[in-house]
Image (cartoon, coloured by chain):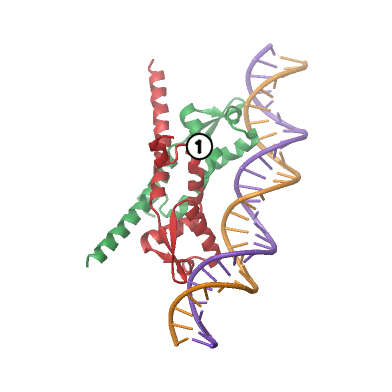
Chain colours: A green, B red, C purple, D orange
Amino acid sequence: MSRAEALSPTRLKDAAPLFAALGDATRLGLLVSLCSGGPLTVTRLSGQFDVSRQAITKHLDVLAEAGLVKSSRRGRERIWTFEPKRLEDAHQYLERLSREWDVALGRLKAFVET
Amino acid sequence: MSRAEALSPTRLKDAAPLFAALGDATRLGLLVSLCSGGPLTVTRLSGQFDVSRQAITKHLDVLAEAGLVKSSRRGRERIWTFEPKRLEDAHQYLERLSREWDVALGRLKAFVET
DNA sequence: TTAACATGCAACCAGGAGGTTACACGTAAT
DNA sequence: ATTACGTGTAACCTCCTGGTTGCATGTTAA
């Protein structure tokens, strides 16, 4: 594995869990809250949604597993914060795909013109 | 709904199904195949994966539902092609999120400096 | 016209995802 | 010291997802 590959997963297949984590309306809502509302606690977050605190905890665990959020304890409460790095990864995956597409289009154009 | 909103869904929540469609390794593989390998038929595609043709069909249906692929009949076979538009949408959703994050950081910085 | 091929459709199955309720436990506030 | 609060854990439920097999149907080729 090269250094470039170590920085962010090379294979597109590795992006699947990341996109899966983004593929839920509640989780996207949580990300937006943490983005714009700053670090928040679980009970605070669950006040903004129609599901129980425990359900929100599960969603946050999924986001944490994907590296999209991070948590830290402070006294009896746990603070959740947004983690922008992995979002950049997802961004790059999409760009890689569309680049591949553009290359294919280029090949097609070259073929047609022959 | 403004014209800009009509072009691509406004609410981030609407992005969930799109990301969910991307959140599966097999489906990402299909997209890559269709991107770089050009339009392909179902049986042709299923040759590249370890699952049955019917399973691949289901995945293609999911991708089509999300607007990521398109299909057309030609004789007895159905040709599947990549559809780059929605990928651009996903791209924009991610950018919107990170922009929101940057704005929040800016607010924090302004607050600290006061 | 028959045989081979590509697809469509339906039934079915196992496991995981998203949700709930109930309760235990540590920490803060009065 | 007691009460209130925030969280963690566990059991449970339902529904969807990803997968299978079997068979029917339409289309091309020999």
- Mark 1 crowd level (few <14, some 14–19, many ≥20, 10 Å Cα): many
Q: Which residue corresponds to the image point at 39% horizontal and 28% vertical from the top-left?
A: B103
Left or right side of A5 for A49: right
Which corner quadrant holds the N terminus of chain B?
top left
Q: Which residue corresponds to the image point at 43% horizontal and 54% vertical from the top-left?
A: A12
User: Hey, which quadrant is residue A27 in on the image?
Assistant: top right
Percent x, y for residue A102? 31, 55
Question: Which amino acid is tagged 1?
Answer: Val
Q: Which residue corresponds to the image point at 35% horizontal and 50% vertical from the top-left?
A: A4
Tell which of B85 and B105 is nearer to you: B85
Q: Which residue corresponds to the image point at 48% horizontal and 57% vertical from the top-left?
A: B27
User: Hey, which quadrant is residue A62 in on the image?
Assistant: top right
Disc 1, SS: strand
The reply to whether residue A24 is in sight is yes
Residue furthest to the left in view is: A114
Left or right side of C15 for A31: left
Tell which of A60 and B20 is nearer to you: B20
Q: Where A94 falls versus D7 (above or below)?
A: below
Q: Where B14 falls versus B26 (above or below)?
A: above
Name the residue carrying label 1.
A69
Percent x, y for residue D11? 75, 44
Percent x, y for residue B64? 48, 55
Which corner quadrant holds the C terminus of chain B?
top left
